[in-house]
Amino acid sequence: MKQRPYVPVGVFFRGSGDPAYERAVNACRAKCRRYSRIRPAALRRQRRFLRRLFGRTGKDVTVVAPFCCDYGYNIEVGDRFYANRNVTMQDGAKITFGDDVFIAPNCVFTTAEHAVDPQLRKAGYEVAKPITVGNNVWIGAGAIILAGVTIGDNAVIGAGSVVTRSIPANVVAAGVPCRVLRQVCEEDARRYPMEERE
């Protein structure tokens, strides 16, 4: 089993300038570049590669290249996971996705937080906090999901949102910072989001 640098979740640790972390991140970046060179139609090959890159994968996992992550082994995805192009996952801590998650292009998931104190930050200290995304979640284009956030089942996160706090299940949430706008309701089965703007 390959050696993984230990990241102490929720406490300060020195990631920047640590050779073990840098080696792991550089190795993962090289894997992400190799993944991006796989033909788009070669889904079986892509899924085999993702099974080696990620800590856990379910059935029918699709990640459209280019894709970037820091370690890979801290990412766990369920069945029928779909991530569109230019998704970035900074997985110093675990990033866990349930089943039937749909991620639009240009989304960022970052478990890292750097010190507010300038001297600690300069010394390379940071914190890693896990991100958890439930089942049947849709995350709109350009959304940013920050460290320590949980997104509940069936939630919809609007495009361009910055999710700084956990979002409950069965809601539509959007904005900077992201906040709950309303509950998912029966009416949603009969309309599309663009109809709300008419």
Image: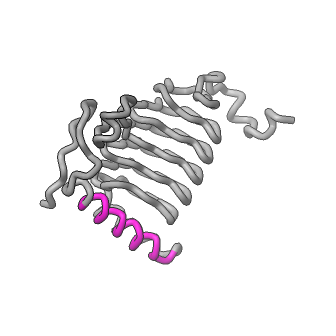
Looking at the rendering, which quadrant does residue 8 occupy? top left
Left or right of residue 150: residue 57 = left
Model colouring? one colour
Quadrant that contains the N terminus: bottom left
On screen, 103 above or below 29? above
Left or right of residue 156: residue 196 = right
- Residue 58 at x, y percent in the picture: 36, 53
Q: Work out whether residue 100 or residue 112 is closer to the camera in this orientation and state it.
A: 112
Q: Residue at x 23, y 38 (%)?
A: 13
- Residue 115 at x, y percent in the picture: 35, 33
Left or right of residue 28: residue 36 = right
Q: Residue at x 43, y 37 (%)?
A: 133
Q: Is residue 163 magenta?
A: no
Q: Residue at x 51, y 63 (%)?
A: 64
Q: Residue at x 42, y 30 (%)?
A: 150
- Residue 149 at x, y percent in the picture: 42, 31
Quadrant that contains the C terminus: top right
Q: Residue furthest right?
A: 198
Numbered disc total: 0
Q: Work out whether residue 189 or residue 193 is closer to the camera in this orientation and state it.
A: 193
Q: Start and end of the magenta stretch?
A: 23-39
Q: Main secondary structure of the magenta part?
A: helix
On screen, 83 above or below 171? below
Q: Work out whether residue 166 or residue 41 is closer to the camera in this orientation and state it.
A: 166
On screen, 17 above or below 38? above
